[in-house]
Image: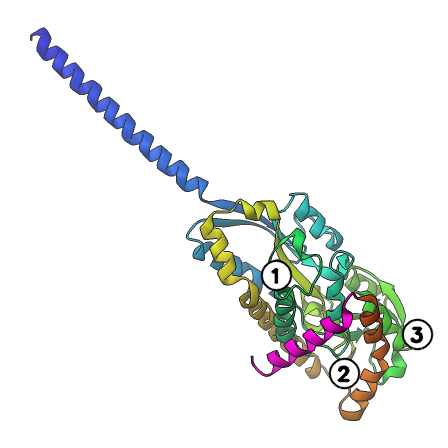
Amino acid sequence: MTSLSRSSRSWRATRRALLGGAVLAALGLASAGALAQTATLKFGTFIPPKADEIERGIAPWLDELEKESGGALKFQRFFGGTIERSLLKQHEQLQNGLQDATIIPVPYVFSLFPDFTVFALPYLVESAKEGSILSWRMHQRGLLRGMDTLHVVGTYLNDPLVLHFRNPIKSLDDVKGAKIRITSPEGVGVIKLFHGAVVGMPISEVAQSLSTGVLDGTMNSWGSLRAFRIESLIKGDVDEPLGAISFIVAINKKVYDGLPAKAKQALEKLGGEKLALRMGAVFDAQAASVKAAARKDPNRTIIGFSGAERDKRLETFKPLYDEWLKSTPEGASKMAALQKLLADIRAGR
């Protein structure tokens, strides 16, 4: 074999090695590029994973976001307080980066989002659906302060709060002096107007407190009775819409700014009013289910008002509205805008 042929074969082998390395390098770069375009976010919340709010609302929504983004967005899911159990600290842990996205229960941080107190007023909203749409449209119009520190993906309300008691209720006289758990400053006003005793407490402690007699009752939505294992402890209810709890679905602003374009497009498409409608439907369906079960219980008493009696009750709560208007900057104009938006929603617009 000549030195020329050996040299030729050596060159061909070297060339194949170089080409192979180039291909592998190209594939590696392509793979790295694909990875660089996938953002993985830690989504944390205190809400139990088996609650309808998660199982039928947030979890499938996250699935749809991942699919819609074409792989640009992935979520690590930390439900049930895996990252942070305290309702008071969901916003704090979002801002300090322990969780990239979360659900903020607004009544626990009203000082940061003061205008949301309007949704806690009694007899304002009649369902989770209309309340959720209303909160989003208020945000869209810049009528809710405090939102500029977050990237807000959506807002929603649960089904209206009503009064639930460990003993049967025959009339409002039975509420007088009862120890009742509340969630907001407006809740304090409602209970005082009912002549009850106000108790502040996280919802995670309500079941235990009812079973031991620390509480006589709680101001909660129908759906939350099941989500937080309170349902079996209740024997009496005052079924009137006494305000609602508002929630903000948010992403850390710096995290959002660094997301790929496709991830942002997916959030834009499936967030906002679409998310409000989704979550409103989840809460209203669960409320209907829990309420139907309660009405079938022969040992359960449920009272409510209608007609003139309801108008009289609304007049009783007028001081709460007056206080909100007085304490809220541009309160009158915001309330007028809210009432117009609410009329549009109820008219199907």
Span highlighted in magenta in the image: 329-349
State the residue in front, 237 or 337.
337
Whether residue 26 sits left or right of residue 91 in the image: it is left
Q: Earlier in the sequence, mark 3 or mark 2?
A: 3
The amino acid type, in three-letter code, at marker 3 is: Gly
Q: Secondary structure at mark 3?
A: loop
Q: Are marks 3 and 1 in contact (CB under 8 Å)?
A: no
- Horizontal and vertical percent for residue 326? 84, 70
Q: Gap in Å between the C-alphas at discs 3 and 1?
A: 35 Å
**Disc 3 crowd, CA 10 A, few/some/many (<14, 14-19, 20+):** some
Q: Secondary structure at mark 1?
A: loop
Whether residue 190 sits left or right of residue 5 in the image: it is right
Locate the C terminus and report the quarter of the image it occupies: bottom right
Whether residue 253 sits left or right of residue 8 in the image: it is right
Q: Secondary structure at mark 2?
A: strand
Question: Which residue sits at x=50%, y=45%?
Answer: 39
Residue at the spot of label 3? 177
Residue at the spot of label 2? 302
Locate the N terminus and report the quarter of the image it occupies: top left
